[in-house]
Image (cartoon, rainbow, N blue to C red):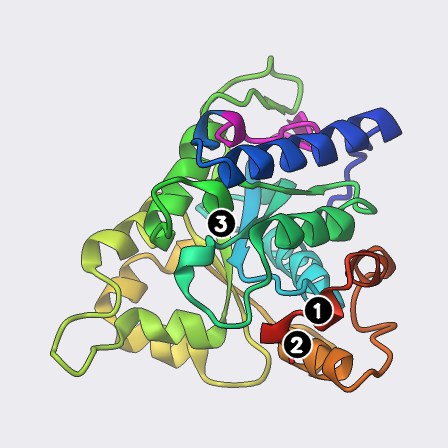
Amino acid sequence: QAVHLVHPRLTPTARLCRKLAIALVCLVAAMGQSPSALCSALPLSKLAQSVPAGHRPVVVVAPGSFSPPTLLHMRIFEEARDALQRAPAFGKPCTVIGGYLSPVHLAYGKKSLAPTEHRLGMVEAAAEGSDWLTVAGWEALREEGYTPTAQVMNHFAEELRSVEVAVGDAAPEAGLVRVAMICGGDVFRSFVDVKEDGERLWSDEDLEVILGENGVVVIEREATGLEDFIEAQPLLKKHRENIIIARPRVFTGISSTAVRQHLAAGESIRYLVPDAVRAYIYEHQLEKLPNWQ
């Protein structure tokens, strides 16, 4: 049975402070200075502070482009939370205490990426109405540029290691939170891909971090035989209890690409993105971005 927790909502003042913080780190970066010291701390205000007895506290993380964030992005978080709380994972029942949207660095090189400050602004707008989702700007604002996924997961795990959570009636304790990355079935299947030069797309070392030290929630959009795929891959099979498959009951074709196409054609994007994201896009005239045409 799903466990629903009451999470603290950010006050209007706290939301304003978060927006000002993002504006500050972007300004610092634009001035050629390092924003790392300003953006390294992970926002913790929406994390639940307790879970039922016998449960493991879990935080879900979705690294992504979010250019722009859509309603499907937000829905996937709900699917991931339900899947984790529906059946045991990581060796015991789980309760999700929070979730993070982590926009990728501009150096990732995807042509459709909006400027960093606007992607952070859009995901902030998207998460503002959620009582459990928030934005982590560390990945997007690192002075080192693009960060491999395994390092991103390591960062979240390290930041959350000091978070204290009470399990049942026990006193709050640090070191209990497990991190799970949300990904699509296509990304999950790429874990075993080999490039043309014979090099693995994902190294065993990185997969040990992602799957062994942390975990993944795979969003399976249709019946694609993921269970058989896992059984056929020794490394995936080894970490089977850390791989959670979420099978949404409702499928949608909403994508950032489709939203950009609607914008380029001067068409409505209502009900494709959160209302606050739609307002942000038009307020900042992002529909006119050359790489969104």
**Amino acid carrying mark 3 in the image:** Ala
Residue linked to disc 2: 255
Numbered badge on residue 72: 1
Mark 1 vs 3: CB contact within 8 A: no
Numbered badge on residue 253: none
Taking the image as shown, residue 206 lies to the left or right of residue 95, namely left
Q: How many marks?
A: 3
Query: Is disc 2 placed on a helix, strand or loop?
Result: loop
CA distance separating discs 1 and 3: 19 Å
**Residue 217 pos. (x, y %):** 51, 60
Q: Magenta-highlighted stretch: main secondary structure?
A: loop
Magenta region: 38-56
Taking the image as shown, residue 96 lies to the left or right of residue 12, namely left
Residue linked to disc 3: 180
19 or 223, which is in the foreground? 19
**Residue 68 pos. (x, y %):** 67, 65
Residue at position x 86%, y 59% in the image: 279
Q: Is residue 1 visible?
A: no
CA distance separating discs 2 and 3: 22 Å
**Residue 63 pos. (x, y %):** 51, 55
How crowded pointer 3 is (Cα within 10 Å; few <14, some 14-19, many 20+) is rated as many
Mark 2 vs 1: CB contact within 8 A: yes
Quadrant location of the C terminus in the rendered image: bottom right
- Is 43 magenta? The answer is yes
69 or 289, which is in the foreground? 289
**Amino acid carrying mark 2 in the image:** Ser
Residue at position x 73%, y 36% in the image: 19
Query: Is disc 3 placed on a helix, strand or loop?
Result: strand
